[in-house]
Image: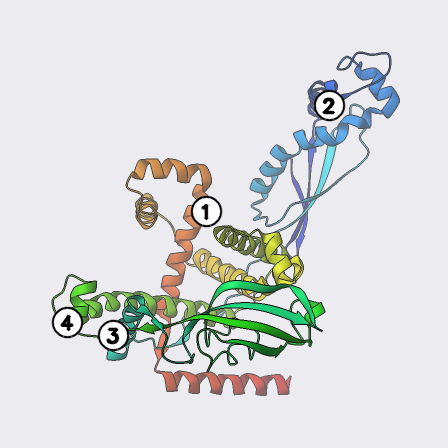
Amino acid sequence: MTELKSHENNIAKFEFDVAYDDFKKATDTVYKRNKKRYRIDGFRPGHVPRRVLEKMYGPEIFYDDAIQIVFPEPYEKAVEELGLEVIDQPSVDLDDIEEGKDITFKVEVETKPHPVLGNYDELVIEEVSEEVTDEDIKSELDRQLEENARLVEITDRPVKADDKVNIDFDGYLDGERFEGGKAEDYDLVIGSNTFITGFEDQIIGHEVGDKFDVNVTFPEDYQAQEFQGKDAKFVVELNSITEKQLPELDDEFAKDISEYDTLEELKDNLREKLADDKKEYAQNMRENQAVEALVEKSEVSAPASMVNREIDYELQNLDQRLQGMGLTLSQYIELTGMDINQIRDQYRAQAEARVKANLVIDEVANKENIEVSDEEKEKELQETAKNYGIDDLEKFKEIFAKNVSDDTLVENIKRRKAVELLASKAKALPHEEYHKFVEENSNEESEEVKED
């Protein structure tokens, strides 16, 4: 029988009993499982009698592992029986274990908080246009021109901004070469701000074959402390200059990069594609704004345990991205000069915002009694498989089921439906009206604070 002692400030305290006989069986299991590990003079390895071990070390030698065996199942049943949404690992205490006496587990665990929602029938967001403009078309064409540009070697003029140069360089600090300050055949785009401020500017005006000095000062906040604020000299040799040349934007360009014969046909096709993108973008923006607006109107806090899990997730993503670049997280930490806590802190604000948003969205789903049908789950799996480019849906379902619980699938669909509901209820105002509304409400809140 489970007894809920208290449930305040999102901390649930409850107790449940485990029969002594079940605990005794667990200690037997622990002894049999680990007996090969015990070594005592006078006994063969694996043949030390249990009574000898208990006499030497006390019966407590088996207790910790036995608790790990008997605790999980009744704990999960207790959580289900009490209807708790736990968000962290439990803290467990128990009285001294006595022969023949049932064991009472005293549990304390953090539970999911339920925000006090603001009125989501009165959400106000900024209008997001779905119109594809001529500027949108121009930006897309400019991008395609850049992708199809060619690099031409330059020999008849000096370096100018936006050129790509190939250089050798050797760095000196206080007249001595320093580690990491030397490279050969290094490609550098002038204006990319890849190097220390002033380095790239001093290459402008030089010609192929020139050998010259570049003098710079390391920033005061440079990641390597030994270089902070120090003056350095780089001996630079200019090996080559290349210039990016864009193709002509005409019918021939359209033919080269697409199935269309004219530039106008290409533009019409881009307009259709961008219309779909703009529509999706606008809907995402409306949804994000609606959720942010409701968070602002609600009383919601972000538990540290949930925030830390979000940060862990971001660090896993960072680690995967670094692996794709041939780096480890440890190498990244060394290169940036930050420790792991500083990196975690970089993700903290966005993690807190995401936790608050999810808590508010989940509360809306609960309040609106949003349900998920089998048909909706099937459609979600089909869309997910399609997004990953997987044709074998049944095989995908099999893999998905092994890695993602049905509860998680349902939760994701509920959240999406709740967000769509919020966006549909929100009133969208044109840019100027929206910012006037925000300013007026900010002033009202300031006046309320003064009165309090």
Question: How much space separates mark 3 and mark 4, taking CA atoms?
Answer: 16 Å
Q: Is residue 331 above or below residue 186?
A: above
Along the viewing direction, whichever of 326 and 447 lies nearer the viewer: 326
Mark 2 touching mark 4, by CB under 8 A? no
Q: CA distance from mark 1 to mark 3?
A: 40 Å
Q: Quadrant of residue 76?
A: top right
State left or right for residue 444 relative to residue 49.
Answer: left
The residues tagged by marks 1 and 4 sit, at their Cα atoms, a distance apart of 51 Å
Q: Amino acid at mark 3?
A: Ile
Looking at the image, do the residues carrying marks 3 and 2 touch, with CB atoms under 8 Å apart? Answer: no
Residue identified by numbered label 4: 251
Q: Secondary structure at mark 3?
A: helix
Of the image marks 1 and 3, the number of the one nearer the N terminus = 3
Seen at 75% across and 21% down, the residue is 37
Label disc, if present, on residue 314 of the rendered structure: none
Q: Amino acid at mark 4?
A: Asp
Q: Quadrant of the N terminus?
A: top right
Q: Which residue is mark 3?
A: 137
340 to 1, vertically: above or below: below
Residue 252, given in percent of the width and then of the height, sits at: 15, 69
Please rate how many residues cluster around mark 1, counting C-alpha atoms within 10 Å: few if below 14, some from 14 to 19, many from 20.
few
Q: Residue at x 36, y 38 (%)?
A: 397
Labels 2, 4: front one: 4
Q: Which residue is mark 1?
A: 408
Q: Nearer the viewer, residue 224 or 36?
A: 224
Q: Gap between marks 1 and 2, in whole Å?
A: 36 Å
Q: Nearer the viewer, mark 3 or mark 2?
A: 3
The residue singled out by tag 2 in the image is: 27
Report whether 388 appears left or right of 269. right
Q: Nearer the viewer, mark 1 or mark 3?
A: 3
SS for tag 2? helix
